[in-house]
């Protein structure tokens, strides 16, 4: 049986410089994610967002599969991009298209994109709305418990009865 080569082993930082470079790579990793998500929200295009962030398109897809938090942010960015596209289409339909600009806008493609992603965006909005409802309910429950404790404490003081906390 052959001995594993150095390439097969995971590399560990050997010096402070290596450790600093590894830390910088982690920081850069977070940096590209923020740039990618911002560009994804603006363009709704993974390839364009990857180019803006300076990474190969496979990298965000891989992270999306591995990191549920990043996947949530990805879906949020796409919802934002959908909203922006919808507003732009509505503006163009209401007020017409500028003829002076270099950029061409394909209304038919935009409408097709909106219709294709309508269901996905609606599902994501429902998930986010349910999460918000759960947070509100939890907050209300906590507040009610706090008020109950205050009422019981006032009653105990008024009647001179000791509370279990005393």
Image: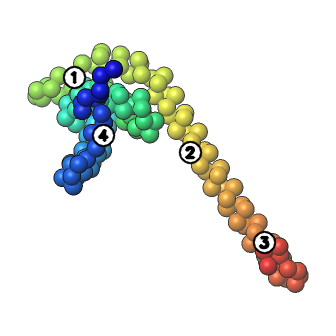
Q: Secondary structure at mark 1?
A: loop
Q: Which residue is mark 1?
A: 105
Q: Which residue is mark 2?
A: 132
Residue at coordinates 38% horizontally, 22% vertically from top-left?
114
| Real-space Cα separation, disc 2 to disc 4, in angstroms | 25 Å
| Real-space Cα separation, disc 3 to disc 4, in angstroms | 49 Å
Q: Which residue is mark 3?
A: 151
Q: Which residue is mark 4?
A: 33
Count the marks: 4
Compared across the picture, whether 157 is left or right of 32 comes to right
15 versus 12 height, above or below: below
Q: Earlier in the sequence, mark 3 or mark 4?
A: 4
| Real-space Cα separation, disc 3 to disc 1, in angstroms | 63 Å
Q: Secondary structure at mark 2?
A: helix
Residue at coordinates 59% horizontally, 39% vertically from top-left?
130
Q: Earlier in the sequence, mark 2 or mark 3?
A: 2
Give the image quarter of residue 161: bottom right
Q: In front: 13, or 22? A: 13
| Real-space Cα separation, disc 4 to disc 1, in angstroms | 28 Å
- For the rendered model, the colour scheme is rainbow
Q: Residue 96's spot in the image, x, y percent? A: 24, 26
Q: Residue 15's spot in the image, x, y percent? A: 21, 52
The answer to whether mark 1 and mark 2 are in CB contact below 8 A is no
């Amino acid at each position: 049986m052959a001995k594993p080569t150095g390439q097969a082993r995971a590399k560990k930082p050997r010096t402070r410089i290596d450790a600093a470079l590894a830390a910088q790579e982690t920081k850069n990793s977070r940096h590209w994610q923020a740039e990618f998500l911002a560009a994804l929200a603006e363009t709704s295009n993974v390839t364009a967002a990857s180019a803006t962030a300076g990474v190969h398109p496979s990298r965000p897809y891989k992270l999306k599969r591995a990191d549920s938090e990043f996947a949530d942010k990805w879906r949020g960015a796409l919802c934002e991009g959908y909203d922006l596209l919808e507003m732009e289409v509505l503006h163009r339909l209401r007020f017409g298209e500028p003829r002076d600009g270099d950029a061409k806008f394909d209304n038919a493609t935009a409408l097709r994109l909106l219709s294709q992603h309508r269901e996905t965006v609606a599902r994501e909005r429902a998930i986010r709305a349910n999460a918000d409802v759960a947070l509100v309910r939890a907050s209300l429950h906590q507040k009610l418990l706090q008020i109950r404790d205050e009422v019981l404490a006032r009653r105990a003081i008024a009647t001179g009865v000791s509370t279990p906390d005393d």
